[in-house]
Amino acid sequence: SAAISACEKDGQPEMAFRLFAQLKERGLQPNIITYNAMISACEKSGQWEKALDLFAEVERRGLGPDIVTSNAMISACEKGKQWETALRFFDELRERGLRPDLITYGAAIAACKGGQWEKALELFEALKKTSGLKPDLVAYGAVIAA
């Protein structure tokens, strides 16, 4: 997990993918931290479809997802210009009993850029009025960009 996470944070997603494959080839089972790092690597390398596959694997294995997984998925879909999928993950995280944080809102609002400004405003208003959180610069920037 640590090596995969280091590769993801260092901007080396291909190395993270190789390490992940080796881990599985050796019969080791990735944990939620490993999956979170892999989904983040997908987000950073523009591979939102691979992130979807990893997310499905997390669910199949009964590992979560947790808020980090959900945030990484929303960001991966946002980077892949898949706003509808990003917002589906946003909606589903509440159904899973997870509470959106500022990262969640920022990524979901950012996913709306390119024409979905009304949805971005709706999310921003929800952030201000119902989440108990205060919008940060990321949220303000995302809603303006939408």
Image (cartoon, rainbow, N blue to C red):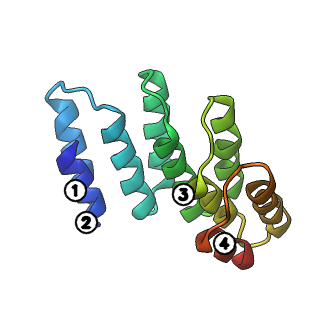
Task: Determine whether the residue tagged by mark 1 lies in a helix, strand or loop.
Answer: helix
The disc, 3 or 1, on the residue closer to the chain's N-terminal end is 1
Rounded to the nearest whole Å, what is the CA distance between mark 1 and mark 2? Answer: 6 Å
Q: Amino acid at mark 4?
A: Ala
Q: Residue placed at 22% from the left, 32% from the top?
A: 24
Question: Quick one: 63 or 54, which is closer to the camera?
Answer: 63
Rounded to the nearest whole Å, what is the CA distance between mark 3 and mark 2? Answer: 18 Å
Q: Is residue 111 above or below residue 58?
A: below
Q: Residue placed at 31% from the left, 31% from the top?
A: 31
Q: Are marks 3 and 2 in contact (CB under 8 Å)?
A: no
Residue that numbered label 4 is attached to: 142
The disc, 3 or 2, on the residue closer to the chain's N-terminal end is 2
Q: Position of residue 98 (x, y in %)?
A: 60, 35
Residue that numbered label 1 is attached to: 6
Asked which quadrant contains residue 25, the reply is top left
Q: Amino acid at mark 2?
A: Asp
Question: Quick one: 72 or 126, which is closer to the camera?
Answer: 126
The disc, 1 or 4, on the residue closer to the chain's N-terminal end is 1
Task: Determine whether the residue tagged by mark 4 lies in a helix, strand or loop.
Answer: helix
Viewer-nearest of labels 4 and 2?
A: 4
Task: Determine whether the residue tagged by mark 3 lies in a helix, strand or loop.
Answer: helix
Asked which quadrant contains residue 123, the reply is bottom right
Say which mark, if any, is on residue 10. Answer: 2
Q: Amino acid at mark 1?
A: Ala
Question: Quick one: 47 or 36, which is closer to the camera?
Answer: 36
Q: Position of residue 37 (x, y in %)?
A: 34, 48
Task: Determine whether the residue tagged by mark 2 lies in a helix, strand or loop.
Answer: loop
